Structures are given as C-alpha cells and as structure tokens.
Image (tube, rainbow, N blue to C red):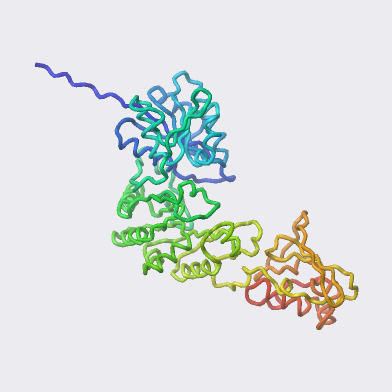
C-alpha cells in the first residue's frame, strides 16, 4: 500500500504596516514598530496565519508597491497602526489607497493611538474598513478567526465597522493584556534600528517592555489603558535583551516604556539579573518621581541597583515647577520639593537625570531639576517687588515703570504715586522678544529694561549718583533681583551695565 504525503500548504497571511512618521529635519533614527511586533506575537503563537511587517520609516512608496505585489494575493487583512502627529495619517491613507487599487485587496484594519482616541471618526473614513480600539493583542487574533470563518464580527473586542449605514460595535476590549513575551524579531531587520546614542552606548537599540501606567497624569496618552499595567517578567526580559546583545553586538538598550519602574520590584529584579549575568550593557529608561518614593517606603535600594547595573540616564518628566499646576492641572501626585529631593538622590547615585518640562506659562517658575544643587529660590519665580509695595523716589511721580516678572505670564504696569503704588495686570504685549543676558548666573528681569525698574530712569535712591556714574543698578534693584531670580548672588561686577 502506498502512502501519499500531503505537500505543505502556505497559511493565510496578515500584513501589518507602520506608515512613515515625519520627524524633525535630519532625523536619522527611528523606533522599531513595537505596536506591530506586539500584535504579531499572538498571531504567530496561534498558528493560524503567517505575518509580514512593512515599516514605512525604512522603506518608501515604491517598496510598498512591490511588497503588495509579493504578498497581497494570500493576505486576509492589512493592519495599519497610526499615531496622530508626524503626518503618519496622511502616509497611511496613501498606502491604503495604493492597496485598494488592486482588485484582490483584503479588508483594511486601523488601530493604534489615534484610533484609541478618535475611533468613530476613523471608522467612518471611506478607505477604512474597520478599526480595533484598545490593545491589539487582545482583538486582532479574534478578528483573524472571524476572517477565517470561525466566528462573528459582533464578538471581536474593540471592533468598529460600517454596516448598513451605521457603526457596528464589538464588546469592550479590556485594557490589561497580562504578561508580555519576547518579540518575533525575525519579522524585522533589527540591524537597521541600531543607533549610536551618545548618552548611552555606541550600539543602542530601543525596547518597550510594558504597556500602560498606574498614574493619573492628565496630559498622557497612557490614560487610555485606564491605569492598567502589563509588562514582561524580569527574567524573560533579561533573556531577550541578552539574546539581542549576542546576536547583534548590542552595547546599550534604551527603554521607551511610559514608565519602566511602575513595578519597582520588577525593576530591582531586572537590575539584579543584569549584574548576576555580568552583561556589559548600558541602559536608560523613564521614571516617575513617585517610583522612587514608593521604593523608599518598601525599603528597596532602587537607585543603588539602577546605578550599579549600568544605567546611564533616567528621564523624569516634571511638567511644571508650580505646585498648583502639578496638583490641579497635571495631577502629577507630587510636589516641587519632592521632585527636587528625588532629582538630588538620582544625582547622588551618579546617574544622569534629564527632566523635560513644560514650555508654557508659568514656565519661568519651572525648575531645572537636572541641576538639583542650584538654589530653589528660582523656581518660586517671585521677587520681593511682587510681595511688597515700594515708594518710588523718581523725580516725576507720574512716571510709569513697566517690568515683566518671571512666572506670571503677564506684564505688571505700575503707576508710581507718592507714598503708595497702584498696580494693574495686563496681557503681555506681542512683538519681538527683548534680548536676555546670556551670561553665567540667573536671568534677571530688570536687565531687559533700559530704566531701573524701581527708581525709573534717574537711578535715584541710595547711592544713586554713584551708581549712575559707574553705570550700575541701584542697591535696591540689585538686592531684589537676587532675591527674586534665585541662585547664588551675582556680584555687580559680573552683571550687565544698567543703561540709564
């Protein structure tokens, strides 16, 4: 009896595409499309389909056309991940338009951060067949089963699609995904994403080991995960990092987790594993000041382990130096003094701490925490002139003194009168910026005025004649500037001469 062996057949294919992101001019490096790798893993683990990935940051429109010619015929869907900025939506629509020119184009599914925020708007677009809201590793395998005839659309978590002139909604897609696993690196050319990062190592690779965040920062996209957190286990993460280091000669890892240290015990275990295996890997990650405070309460030497395991840099976002903004607007759940304390502790352990902050008002009240040893008076943004009223001794009582105070976002116009002052606050006038003194030391508000803010153009007051002769500010002006702008007092000899 002869046995016939069945020839292996190719499985259906899922195409995952990441459109190009237009970064700033001359931007040389791009992240790996971790959103696609995250979705691809459960699809491959399920064994029902094969997966291919197209990264628009590494390939152009002509490559996309050839990619479609090679793979579209056996594809059951095209998944597109998009963010809102960087013209990625425009490039995504151009890619989909190219695919739909072909007669055998399968359904096009959109997901990603933009969809999570504006799902219905995206689902109603003529080039979009359906969208998936929430983590794709929950919803994409269920959608693939439906496309293969093993279910119905109504059961797909997070699904929105047009049907009979209305939107069909699937069940809610849970924001928590459980433990994450190793990425299917074979779907990408990893060597294309290795970069020379001067703050970390010559051969640095980006990595994302978690999703979501437990904090309430109101500006953050991670709120879409409803404060649910999913992450790789520390041991599996070190295994994956070690394999990458051996396979691609990696010398540094830059974690792009929203907050790598949400689970402080996982972070400590990660550091211990790196040291136990003696992996010569430099690394960097983002941290919330509350992580350090929680580690202290749990009696964990988090910062000591971080420094000992080769961490070169911690990115700690402090969106404002004003406690009111942190508390009422950002909801950072931390005070300015606590942020100072954490930044000082990081610096004491020898790790570089980068602290980006908001550029909007009250930006001048915002503290540069990367230099925690500097005096904290600058962050207050208050000079004695805003706390007390002074009697002007100018020769003309009706003379106005206009001064822009740091941290107010407005100009205070004061009409000086004998024995008292009357102050009004108005919007800052638009126009070209006045030049600031770029020398060492604090930026002094009175340097931008041709006249002495306290004594008018005459420099009257204590030692007025001597100051005019020497081209220096009056004593009161110098003292108030020191008290208001913070930092060590700047000697008069080091300041810009005051024009009368």
Judge left or right: residue 255 versus residue 481: left
The image shows a total of numbered marks equal to 0
Q: Quadrant of the C terminus?
A: bottom right
Q: In the drawing, does residue 44 fall left or right of residue 425?
A: left
Quarter of the figure that contains the N terminus: top left
Residue drawn where x is 39% and y is 46% of the image: 176
Residue closer to the observer: 31 or 181:
181
Q: Which residue lies furthest to the left in this view?
A: 1
Q: Which residue is drawn at 45% across and 26% down?
A: 107
| Residue 496 coordinates in the image, percent (x, y) | 74, 71
Residue 463 placed where, x, y %?
81, 83
Q: Position of residue 31 (x, y in %)?
A: 47, 45
Where 294 sits versus 26, above or below?
Answer: below
> Based on the displayed image, in which of its 4 quarters is residue 433 positioned?
bottom right
Asked if one can make out residue 256 in the rendered structure from this viewpoint, the answer is no
Using the image as rendered, state which of residue 25 and residue 415 is in the foreground. Answer: 415
Q: Is residue 70 visible?
A: yes
Above or below: residue 402 compared with residue 113:
below
Q: Is residue 432 left or right of residue 67?
A: right
- Asked if 487 appears above or below 195 in the picture, the reply is below
The vertical placement of 76 against 396, above or below, is above
Please state if 13 lies on the left or on the right of 380 as rendered: left
């Amino acid at each position: 009896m002869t046995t016939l062996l069945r020839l292996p057949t190719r499985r259906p294919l899922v195409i995952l595409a990441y459109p190009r992101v237009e970064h700033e001019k001359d931007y040389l490096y791009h992240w790996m499309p971790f959103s696609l790798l995250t979705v691809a893993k459960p699809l491959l683990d399920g064994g029902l389909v094969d997966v291919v990935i197209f990264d628009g940051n590494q390939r152009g429109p002509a490559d996309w056309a050839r990619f479609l010619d090679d793979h579209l015929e056996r594809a059951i869907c095209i998944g597109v991940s998009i963010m809102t900025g960087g013209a990625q939506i425009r490039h995504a629509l151009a890619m989909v338009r190219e695919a739909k020119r072909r007669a055998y184009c399968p359904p096009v599914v959109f997901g990603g951060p933009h969809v999570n925020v504006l799902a219905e708007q995206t689902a109603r677009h003529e080039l979009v067949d359906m969208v998936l809201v929430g983590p794709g590793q929950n919803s994409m395998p269920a959608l693939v089963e439906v496309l293969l005839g093993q279910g119905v659309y109504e059961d797909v978590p997070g699904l929105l699609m047009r049907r009979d002139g209305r939107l069909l909604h699937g069940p809610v897609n849970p924001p928590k995904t459980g433990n994450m696993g190793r990425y299917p690196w074979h779907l990408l050319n990893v060597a294309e994403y290795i970069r020379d990062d001067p703050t970390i190592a010559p051969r640095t690779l980006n990595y994302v080991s978690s999703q979501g965040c437990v904090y309430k920062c109101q500006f953050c996209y991670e709120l879409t995960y409803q404060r649910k957190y999913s992450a790789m286990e520390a041991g599996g993460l070190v295994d994956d990092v070690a394999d990458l280091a051996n396979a691609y000669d990696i010398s540094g890892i830059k974690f792009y987790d929203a907050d790598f240290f949400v689970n402080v015990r996982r972070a400590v275990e990660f550091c211990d594993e790196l040291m136990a295996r003696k992996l010569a890997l430099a690394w960097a990650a983002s941290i919330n000041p509350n992580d350090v405070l929680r580690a202290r309460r749990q009696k964990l030497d988090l910062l000591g382990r971080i420094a000992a395991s080769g961490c070169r840099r911690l990115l700690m976002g402090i969106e404002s130096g004003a406690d009111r903004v942190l508390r009422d607007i950002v909801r950072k759940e931390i005070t300015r003094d606590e942020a100072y304390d954490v930044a000082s502790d990081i610096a004491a352990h020898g790790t570089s701490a980068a602290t980006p902050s908001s550029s909007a008002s009250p930006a001048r009240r915002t503290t540069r925490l990367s230099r925690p040893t500097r005096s904290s008076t600058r962050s207050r943004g208050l000079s004695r002139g805003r706390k007390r009223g002074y009697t002007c001794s100018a020769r003309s009582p009706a003379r106005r003194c206009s001064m822009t105070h740091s941290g107010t976002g407005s100009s205070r116009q004061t009409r000086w009168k004998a024995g008292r002052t009357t102050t009004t606050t108005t919007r800052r006038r638009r126009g070209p910026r006045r030049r600031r003194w770029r020398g060492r030391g604090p930026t002094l508000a009175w340097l931008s005025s041709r006249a002495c803010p306290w004594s008018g153009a005459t420099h009257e007051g204590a030692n007025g004649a001597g100051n005019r002769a020497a081209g220096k500010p009056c004593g009161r002006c110098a003292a108030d500037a020191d008290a208001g702008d913070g930092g060590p007092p700047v000697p008069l000899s080091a300041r810009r001469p005051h024009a009368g």
